[in-house]
Image (cartoon, rainbow, N blue to C red):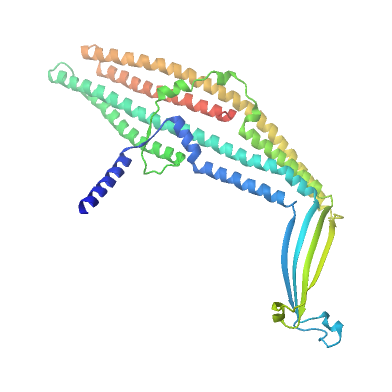
């Protein structure tokens, strides 16, 4: 038995260890899909839509039959007439009176209710557009966070490679210096550059952990879990260069912010229509059935011989406005003004988005052009650095010249990586504006 327990605990420990050692891997597309499924802001947006659907039914239910029951009990503490045997009129004031009843109410006409039904569609669209806005924002944030983490990750790898190359050069230069064939400054220049790279690597490694932590928040993953990024910037930039996205035309009405502004204008129109409907009469029908039981003792109500009087009544109630000291007129005018403001806001949004579309396409095109330029610059910087290493070893170039060439290479490497990030982020921004999936 003891050996079995040890075996069980050993297997459990091994399972936990393997679970901790196997990180969750995500490509960019997988990260986006996972975030759209698990991000808590998106879950809240789904719940808001569900609440809106229930509220829509609440509105519809107002025009459907309403059945209510009630039980009214009266205890006459002081009666103007005490019951007298043989005097039927004295029983108009019994000591106890119990009236259970059921009432059916049915709305026949209400202008406000009709407007409310029209508002249901707009109300659901507002909730759906709010979710789409959240989805677009989360997707753009995931793209940015993933790319920033990937930028840091690949910067670490480049820095490690630079450190290895520089360390080899430093060791070779030290040997040359020990043989008296070069100056001590040449060694010191390389040591200075190496120290800077090592500090930069430590800083990048810290930043990488922070970047993945923010990505975990967007994905809805606990901070204790380990994640790995499987994409590379080189593969992503190829996927994210799409010139058709720049040349194609897309209607402004697809933009989420435009849809939200249009929803606002429509809702303001319906509010104005609602205020106008308040001038119309409201018609309700009712059907009421009740039992009346009177007794000198409350306990009689629980006896079979207790007498109950049944009655049924039906009728119609009509309410119509006569005079409100111009209060309702002011509400109508205010609603009309707010509708006019919303229509103007919609025009402003359309003009603003037209400019944003143009700028986003220009920025995306510029990012692609910059990427091409930085790619060529990197190739040149690598070539220059290789030449300076050879010249330095041959004693033609100074350590300062070599350090300058190396610094130029390191800067070109970061500019190249950043140009890739800009291409991906600018495309994501453009897709967000165009509301493309």
Res 68 quadrant in image: bottom right
Answer whether residue 38 is visible to the viewer in this image. yes
> Viewed as shown, does residue 258 lie left or right of 306?
left
Name the residue at the bottom extreme.
Answer: 85
Residue located at (73% from left, 74% from top):
73
Res 247 quadrant in image: top right
Q: Quadrant of the C terminus?
A: top right
Name the residue at the left extreme.
Answer: 179
Residue located at (63% from left, 30% from top):
254
Coordinates of residue 193 in the picture (x, y in percent)? 27, 25
Name the residue at the front extreme.
Answer: 304
> Viewed as shown, does residue 52 lie left or right of 273?
left
> Viewed as shown, does residue 208 lie left or right of 435?
left
Residue located at (36% from left, 14% from top):
380
Residue located at (30% from left, 40% from top):
18
Coordinates of residue 392 in the picture (x, y in percent)? 24, 14
Q: Foreground: 45 or 194? A: 45
Query: How many marks overall?
Result: 0
Q: Foreground: 334 or 61? A: 61
Q: Foreground: 233 or 52? A: 52
Coordinates of residue 232 in the picture (x, y in percent)? 39, 26
Q: Quadrant of the N terminus?
A: bottom left
Coordinates of residue 194 in the picture (x, y in percent)? 26, 27
Q: Where is 16 relative to 203, above or below?
A: below
Q: Foreground: 370 or 311? A: 311
Answer whether residue 338 is visible to the viewer in this image. no
């Amino acid at each position: 038995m003891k050996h079995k327990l040890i075996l069980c605990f050993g297997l459990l420990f091994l399972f936990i260890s393997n679970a901790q050692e196997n990180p969750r891997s995500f490509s960019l597309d997988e990260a986006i899909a996972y975030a759209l499924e698990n991000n808590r802001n998106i879950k809240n947006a789904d719940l808001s839509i569900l609440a809106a659907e229930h509220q829509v039914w609440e509105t519809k239910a107002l025009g459907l039959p309403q059945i209510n029951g009630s039980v009214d009990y009266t205890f006459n503490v002081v009666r103007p007439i005490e019951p007298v045997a043989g005097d039927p009129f004295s029983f108009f004031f019994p000591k106890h009176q119990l009236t259970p009843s059921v009432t059916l109410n049915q709305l026949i006409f209400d202008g406000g209710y009709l407007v409310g039904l029209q508002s249901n569609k707009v109300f659901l669209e507002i909730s759906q557009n709010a979710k789409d806005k959240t989805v677009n924002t989360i997707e753009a944030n995931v793209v940015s966070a993933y790319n920033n983490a990937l930028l840091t990750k690949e910067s670490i790898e480049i820095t490690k490679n630079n450190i290895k190359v520089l360390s080899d050069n430093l060791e070779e230069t030290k040997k040359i210096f020990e043989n008296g064939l070069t100056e001590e400054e040449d060694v010191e220049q390389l040591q200075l550059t190496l120290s800077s790279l090592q500090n930069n690597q430590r800083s990048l490694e810290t930043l990488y952990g922070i970047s993945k932590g923010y990505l975990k928040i967007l994905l809805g993953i606990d901070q204790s879990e380990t994640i790995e990024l499987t994409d590379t910037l080189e593969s992503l930039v190829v996927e994210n260069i799409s010139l058709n996205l720049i040349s194609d035309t897309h209607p402004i009405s697809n933009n989420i912010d435009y849809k939200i502004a249009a929803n606002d204008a429509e809702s303001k129109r319906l509010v104005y229509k609602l205020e106008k409907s308040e001038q119309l009469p409201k018609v309700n029908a009712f059907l009421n059935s009740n039992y009346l039981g009177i007794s000198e003792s409350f306990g009689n109500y629980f006896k079979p011989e207790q007498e109950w009087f049944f009655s049924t009544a039906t009728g119609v109630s009509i309410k119509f406005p006569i005079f409100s000291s111009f209060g309702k007129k002011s509400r109508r005018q205010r609603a009309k003004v707010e509708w006019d403001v919303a229509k103007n806001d919609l025009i402003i949004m359309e003009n603003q988005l037209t400019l944003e579309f143009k700028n986003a396409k220009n920025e995306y095109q510029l990012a692609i052009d910059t990427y091409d330029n930085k790619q060529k610059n990197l190739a040149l910087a690598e070539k220059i650095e290789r030449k300076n290493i050879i010249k330095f070893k041959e004693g033609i170039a100074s350590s300062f010249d070599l350090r300058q060439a190396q610094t130029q290479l390191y800067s070109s490497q970061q500019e190249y990586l950043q140009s890739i990030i800009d291409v991906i982020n600018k495309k994501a921004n453009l897709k967000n504006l165009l509301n493309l999936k």
